[in-house]
Structures are given as structure tokens and as C-alpha cells.
Image (tube, rainbow, N blue to C red):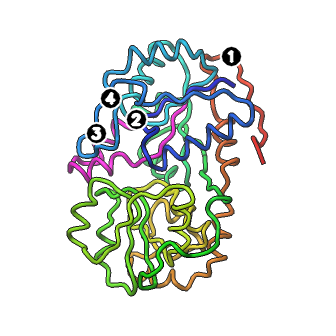
């Protein structure tokens, strides 16, 4: 298959959408497919207001049309609803091309958290955007239910995975010298992640924040007793998960939460609110409670081998296979090679 993925979230951004797409591409290419990701790095771009790390393509439609013509894809997937996603959808509508989309981010809730715009207004546009697709991929049952409730049609089941070789149990040395137990948050330090709900808790030991973002400076000034470790990648990130006693996930707006799987794969139980994402992913690998402090303390009692076993239920090969088998041919009446087989064990 010759596939093009259009995504406003792509390298050098660091987030769950990028990590998911990277692994889907890797799995599909290992199975013999040709996959091209078109992201904002290939266009004139500008920083997202209030979030300098995120770049958005500036007036990308004409150049994107030329790129699609040059690529000549069998199938097209639009991963995001930003400037590139909007341009790709417009080109498809003009040319009569069929495409699929995926729903990674609770965009309406994020916009509401940053601007106060009512989520219902944003959902009108999101429904219009996704209902033009042949199908919209959604990774959890909770998300699929919400999309259906909001009027999105043709919702397709998907999943996500975790690198069980990188994220695994082992020596716990990353935070030597810090009082235990260690409660860690891992991810973007931004207002929609609700990190203050964790940092204000009265907990024993040490609170650690692994990551960076626009809210770091204000949170660091407000909570001087918290250890801010900055971004960590690869084995250093795995060590940070491994050496934590509990991974705290205070977000109420995530659709999935790859960090949940990464932490549990390292044997670290999760504490979170019982909301979309944690409710679908954590299971016996942690504790969910509307009282986040109570969840944190309860998670201390979850055996690390139980957390690991929960993460082992998810694989990137299953994720990529579900993605691949639900793609559609660009033009009606054409066929794409799309066998219902695992891409790679």
C-alpha cells in the first residue's frame, strides 16, 4: 500500500499523537507498505499561540495539493483537525477523494481550558470535519461513545500500544536521594493537563514532574518543593517511570494517555481520575478515584507485576493492523492491498 498521512502533529513535537503515528509508520513499513507523513515541518509555519513548541503550517493548501499529486497515494488518512487537516479535507472534497480520519485529542475541551470558548461550539465544527470521512478511528470505548453522542458517524474501533522492550521493569536508580515514595507526573506541562490538581495534594515522599511546556515556570514558582526533571527520552524516560512508586495522571481531557501504558509497562501503578482514558486503560494496573489523593495512596498497594501485566495487553502491532485494515481506497471502485493479517509479531 502507498499511504499518505496528513498530520498537524509531527516531529519535532513530542506528544502521544506523534508517538502513535511513528509506531504505525514503523509497523506498516516493516510489513512492506510505503508510508509518507506530511507534517508542518515541510511548510512555512508559525508557533501556536501560547505554546511555542507546537508549529502550525501557514496557508498550506497549494503546496499540500502538489505533494499529494507527487505522492500518488492509494489511501489518505487525516490525523488532525489543524491547518493541514483542514487543507487536506478541502482537497479531498474538491477532488472527490475518499479518506479516513482519527480522533486523538479532545480539542473542544482543550480550547475551552485555554480560551473559555464553550465546547459545544467547537463540537459543531468537529462533527462537520469528521463526518466527511469514510470513517473516524477512535481508540477507546469511552471515546467512541462520546463521538456517537456528539453526532459523529462511521466511528471505527482502534487501539494504541506500548514498547514493552524499552518500557520494562528493572533497576530503580533515576531518583536516588529523593525521599520516598515518589509520585511522578509525566507529560506536557500545560494547563489542559490539570497538573496543579496533583501538585497541591498532601502526599508523603516527593512529587516529581517529568516533562516541559508553557506552564512549567508558573508551576515551579508556585510549588517549590516539587522536583521538575524536564524532558526525558528513551531509556532515561523508562528509568524515570521505573523509579517512580506511582505515576499520577491528573488530566480530565485526554482520549487515551500513552504515558499510562508506559508507566505500567515499567511496573509503576497509575493514580488517576475515573475519566476517559484512565477508565479504559488502567484496569487493575492502578487506582481511579474522584479523590486523587486517595487514588495515589491506593496505587501504592498495587503490585508492580500486576501493572506490568495490564500493559502487556496492548501492542503496537495490533494498533497498526487495526489502522491499516480500516483504510479506504482514495477513489471509489479502486482496491488497495489490505489483508486482515498481523503486520509483525
Rounded to the nearest whole Å, what is the CA distance between mark 4 and mark 1? 35 Å
Q: Earlier in the sequence, mark 1 or mark 2?
A: 2
Check disc 2 and report the residue beneath it: 81
Q: Which residue is mark 3?
A: 48
**Tag 1 secondary structure:** loop
Contact between marks 3 and 4 (CB within 8 A): the answer is no
Between marks 3 and 4, how big is the CA–CA gap? 9 Å
Residue 45 badge: 4
Q: Residues within 10 Å of mark 2 (few under 14, many from 20)?
A: many
Look at the magenta stretch and give its main secondary structure. helix
Q: State the image coordinates of residue 246 (x, y, percent, origin top left).
A: 49, 76
Q: Is residue 59 left or right of residue 337?
A: left
Give the foreground label among 4 and 1: 4
The answer to whether residue 280 is seen in the rendering is: no
3 vs 2, front mark: 3
Q: Residue at x 28, y 57 (%)?
A: 191
Question: Where are the magenta residues, as a range?
Answer: 100-126
**Residue 282 position by quadrant:** bottom right
| Element marked by disc 3 | strand
Residue 171 in percent (x, y) is at: 61, 75
Q: Earlier in the sequence, mark 4 or mark 1?
A: 4
Amino acid at each position: 500500500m502507498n499511504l499518505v498521512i496528513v498530520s498537524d502533529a509531527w516531529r519535532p513535537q513530542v506528544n502521544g499523537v506523534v508517538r502513535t503515528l511513528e509506531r504505525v509508520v514503523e509497523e506498516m513499513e516493516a510489513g512492506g507498505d510505503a508510508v509518507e507523513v506530511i507534517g508542518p515541518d515541510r511548510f512555512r509555519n508559525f508557533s501556536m499561540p501560547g505554546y511555542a513548541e507546537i508549529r502550525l503550517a501557514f496557508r498550506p493548501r497549494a503546496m499540500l495539493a502538489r505533494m499529494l499529486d507527487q505522492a500518488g497515494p492509494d489511501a489518505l488518512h487525516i490525523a488532525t483537525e489543524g491547518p493541514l487537516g483542514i487543507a487536506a479535507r478541502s482537497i479531498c472534497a474538491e477532488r472527490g477523494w475518499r479518506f479516513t480520519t482519527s480522533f486523538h485529542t479532545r480539542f473542544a475541551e482543550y480550547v475551552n481550558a485555554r480560551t473559555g470558548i464553550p465546547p459545544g461550539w467547537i463540537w459543531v465544527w468537529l462533527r462537520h470535519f469528521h463526518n466527511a470521512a469514510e470513517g473516524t478511528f477512535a481508540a477507546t470505548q469511552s471515546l467512541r461513545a462520546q463521538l456517537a453522542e456528539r453526532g459523529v458517524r462511521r466511528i471505527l474501533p482502534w487501539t494504541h500500544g506500548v514498547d514493552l522492550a524499552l518500557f520494562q521493569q528493572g533497576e530503580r536508580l533515576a531518583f536516588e536521594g529523593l525521599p520516598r515514595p515518589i509520585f511522578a507526573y509525566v507529560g506536557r506541562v500545560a494547563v489542559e493537563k490539570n497538573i496543579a490538581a496533583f501538585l497541591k495534594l498532601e502526599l508523603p515522599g516527593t512529587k516529581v514532574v517529568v516533562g516541559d511546556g508553557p506552564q512549567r515556570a508558573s508551576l515551579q514558582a508556585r510549588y517549590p518543593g516539587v522536583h521538575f526533571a524536564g524532558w526525558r527520552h528513551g531509556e532515561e524516560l523508562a528509568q524515570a517511570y521505573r523509579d517512580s512508586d506511582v505515576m499520577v495522571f491528573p488530566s480530565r481531557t485526554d482520549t487515551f494517555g500513552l504515558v499510562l501504558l508506559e508507566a505500567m509497562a515499567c511496573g509503576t501503578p497509575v493514580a488517576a481520575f475515573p475519566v476517559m482514558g484512565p477508565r479504559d486503560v488502567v484496569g487493575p494496573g492502578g487506582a481511579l478515584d474522584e479523590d486523587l489523593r486517595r487514588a495515589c495512596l491506593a496505587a501504592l498497594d498495587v503490585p508492580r507485576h500486576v501493572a506490568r501485566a495490564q500493559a502487556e495487553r496492548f501492542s503496537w502491532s495490533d494498533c497498526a493492523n487495526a489502522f491499516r485494515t480500516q483504510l479506504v481506497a482514495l477513489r471509489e471502485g479502486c482496491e488497495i492491498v489490505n489483508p486482515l493479517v498481523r503486520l509483525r509479531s
